[in-house]
Amino acid sequence: MSTTVPGAPSPASGSRAARRDNEPMTGTAFGDETGAGSRTGHVLVACDKFKGTLSAREVATCIADGLRAVTPGVSVVAVPVADGGDGTLIAVEEAGFDVVPVTVDGPTGEAVVTRYAAREGVAVVELADACGLVRLPGGRLAPLDASSRGVGQVLAAALSAGYRDIVLAVGGSASSDGGAGMMSALGAVLRDRDGRELPPGGGALTDLETLDLSAIHPALADAHIVLACDVDNPLLGSHGAVAVYGPQKGATDATADRLEDGLRRWAELVLTVTGGDYAGRPGAGAAGGVGFAALAFLRARMRPGIELLLDTVGFEEKLRGAQLVITGEGSLDEQTLRGKTPAGVARAAKAGEVRVVAVCGQSSLAADRARAAGIERVFALTDLEPDPEICMAQAGPLLTSMAGEVARAYLQ
């Protein structure tokens, strides 16, 4: 992650992102105090967002406040993390990456101001912030029309700026277009049988007849792209992009059938043009098939998103000397064990022989399953307030109170 590209821009020393590398994230709430911890070591807070209620930064602030209310002298080190979906950019920006704004097409074509993050010749691109579900106008799902074009435009901007080492975080996609939109932004031309360019979206892929790669972005030839991805789904079939992830994007019944047919046509044509069969590869079904395009055209190397992010934000260094790690996200369940933030943090903390507890809004994860994953105990907000609506509305105060419970159980 520290490769330097000759001529690539680097963070300006006076930029906001560069300055806050060594500054507290929320004033006096907490800072990087690893070297000044208590006699028994600091507490490392490494949480993802509580989706729909609290950002990762807000989660960390609430936990720090709750810990210090019970144990005022405790040293707290906070490192917001993510698993490759929305929040990835925030996590690396907190680690000191510079911010480069880019205006792109949102999932349904509206202009979106997003950015990529960059440091030491490495650029981090997040699909979710460019054209993901969080960018759908009014939250209205558009399974047939939503496109991945926006993330391709961000990639093109980073490549044109001189970056050749790029992390592509693909969680939170709104589309099921197999990455066709991403590739069109990078210079590929998709046409129907009458020679007309296809409109955006996976619904148009059933009309795909030809694929022209002659104008593909020239910098891709020597780019090294890492696909931050936590799923192993193929592109097609009962475990594929549409069958597994289509429903959350509004794709059911006839709509799902049309998208599946379009992805099948796209895969057939890519095989003809490139000579490579990528549809069955693990991860090809990620982000509505963006994983497929990344493998087929970008020569991307896959790596679990949480592992990549932990390396990027310097988790191992911050872990040294810690007495406890607090991780968490909005909901803990069996999916948590498949590459989500708490499982990844617990795995990394285990290597450093540091105890781990998790905080969350709600949990359906059995205690023995959590312990097997390295999480000693789970603290859920619903244990304090069983009403889910009240729990979400009062997530901040409840989390602060819950952190006090953690302090009483582990720090006194």
Image (cartoon, helix red, strand yellow):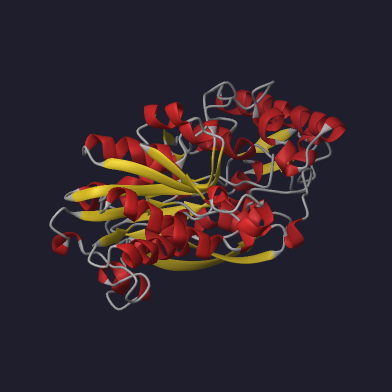
Q: Inspect this view and state whether residue 159 appears.
A: no
Asked if 69 appears above or below 259 in the picture, the reply is below
**Position in image of residue 102 (x %, y %):** 53, 66
Asked if 34 appears above or below 177 in the picture, the reply is below
Q: Inspect this view and state whether residue 50 appears.
A: yes
Residue 124 image-quadrant placement: bottom left
Position of 224 with respect to 185 (left or right) is left
Between 228 and 11, which is closer to the camera in this rendering? 228
Which residue is at 81% across, 28% downward?
Answer: 257
**Quarter holding the C terminus?**
bottom left
Between 119 and 132, which is closer to the camera in this rendering? 132
**Position in image of residue 376 (x %, y %):** 35, 36
Residue at the far bottom in the pictured view: 14
Residue 6 image-quadrant placement: bottom left
Residue 192 image-quadrant placement: top right
Which residue is at 33% across, 55% downward?
Answer: 407
**Position in image of residue 281 (x %, y %):** 53, 23
Between 304 and 36, which is closer to the camera in this rendering? 36
